[in-house]
Amino acid sequence: MKSFFQPEVYQELEVRLEKIKPDSQPLWGKMNAGQMMNHCQEPLKIAVNKSEKTLKPNWLVKLLFKKMLYSPKPFRKNAPTPPQFRSTGDFDFEKEKAELKKWMQELWEDRDNENRTPHPVFGTFTKEQWGILQWKHLNHHFEQFGV
């Protein structure tokens, strides 16, 4: 399974990110391109322990999510977004894209970290699980915008 921490996968994500433009339209869902750029930052911030969101653990969600994480199937289209991860309103596309690149680079530079703070909702992840999660999430939203 692909991982954010694989050099060729990270480079592919960078190339795909550049193909998304302010007027890119989603193939599903309600977010516009600027909102998606903002939304994709939070899981990266969580991975490098710089999120300011208050999230609560949920054992059922944790169990179901970890099963989905290891499935080769992509994340389901139109799956509901938890309220604390919704990005609504107007966002400056270029600013949000630059921020997303920054958080991607920060996690990439920290890729060898084996002792991450546990995810606030899903608990402890291995390095492998963190890499799969980040790839699956970014891939899901990049595909949402046709790249």
Image (cartoon, grey):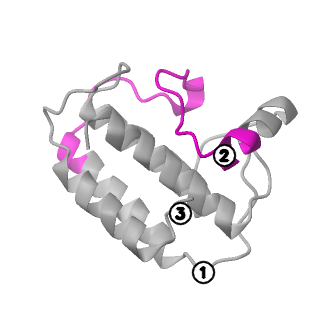
In magenta segment, residue 91: yes
- 132, above or below 68, in the image: below
Q: Horizontal and vertical percent for residue 14? A: 29, 62
Q: Position of residue 6 (x, y in %)?
A: 48, 72
Asked which quadrant contains residue 75, the reply is top right
Please tell me whether mark 2 or mark 1 is closer to you in this view.
Answer: 2
- For label 3, the crowd category at 10 Å Cα-Cα, with few meaning under 14, some 14 to 19 and many 20 or more, is some
Reply yes or no: does residue 81 show up in magenta. Answer: yes
Label disc, if present, on residue 3 of the rendered structure: 3
The residues colored magenta run 66-95
Residue appearing at x 43%, y 38% in the figure: 39
Residue ID at (68%, 39%): 68
Residue 9 shows in the view = yes
Residues at discs 2 and 1 in contact (Cβ within 8 Å): no
- The answer to whether residue 50 is seen in the rendering is no
- Distance of mark 2 from mark 1, alpha carbons? 20 Å
Dot 2, how many residues are within 10 Å of its Cα: few (below 14), some (14-19), or many (20+)?
some
Query: Can you tell which of label 3 and label 1 is closer to the viewer?
Result: 3
Q: Nearer the viewer, residue 29 or 47?
A: 29
Amino acid type at mark 3? Ser
> Element at badge 2?
helix
Residue visible at 74% across and 74% down? 115
Q: Amino acid at mark 2?
A: Leu
Which amino acid, by three-letter code, is at mark 1? Asp
Q: CA distance from mark 3 to mark 1?
A: 13 Å
**Numbered mark located on residue 69 in the image:** 2
Q: Sequence-wise, which precedes: disc 3 or disc 2?
A: 3
In the image, 38: left or right of 77? Answer: left
Instruction: Choose the circle earlier in sequence order: 2 or 1.
Output: 2
